Amino acid sequence: GYTLDQLVRMDRAQLEALHRAAAPVWPVPDETVPLAQVLPGPMTATLELDDKRWGTAITVICSYDEGMRTSVPYDLAVVDVDGHESSAGSWSGVPGVTARIPVATAVPRERISAFEIRLSDGRTILRGAP
């Protein structure tokens, strides 16, 4: 750590370098999949996909409108190239928040044909394909 006196004496370049070193660095995903709206709703989302030996790691990056009235449960469905569907995870949206939600599927990325974010009643609200 630095003392207050040391920080005060730093020039702008030193402070910026210190900030960059302390800032979290997100790894670059193997693929990014934007999701398109199927039904109007308060959420937008993008998926970051990472190949793993066991399947595919997925980070759901979703943003919710401030005007969202209540917290809503969502599910991420993965559809493989044979048409089989499975759930990669579920979560609840929070008004006015952007969240990074880690989920996963055993399906390898090259065998995924589509992603769908669904409401608890099964309706698809967002869809995308790798």
Image (spheres, helix red, strand yellow):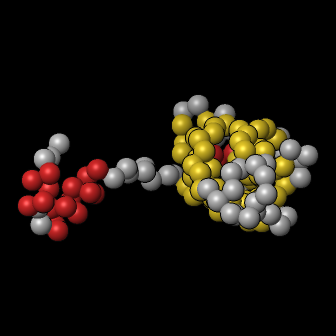
Q: Residue furthest top?
A: 54
Q: Residue furthest front?
A: 4
Quarter of the picture containing the N terminus is top left
Which residue: 71% across, 38% down? 89
122 and 43: which one is in front? 43
Residue 122 in picture, x, y percent from top left: 89, 47
Quarter of the picture containing the C terminus is bottom right
How many marks are shown on the rendered structure? 0
Q: Quadrant of residue 11?
A: bottom left
Residue 15 in picture, x, y percent from top left: 19, 61
55 and 34: which one is in front? 34
Q: Is residue 113 visible?
A: no
Q: Quadrant of residue 105?
A: top right
Which residue: 62% across, 50% down? 60
Q: Is residue 33 left or right of residue 36?
A: left
Vertical side of 11 occupied by 111: above or below:
above
Q: Is residue 71 left or right of residue 30?
A: right
42 and 5: which one is in front? 5
Vertical side of 37 occupied by 107: above or below:
above
Residue 2 in picture, x, y percent from top left: 14, 46
Vertical side of 74 occupied by 55: above or below:
above
Which residue: 54% across, 45% down? 50
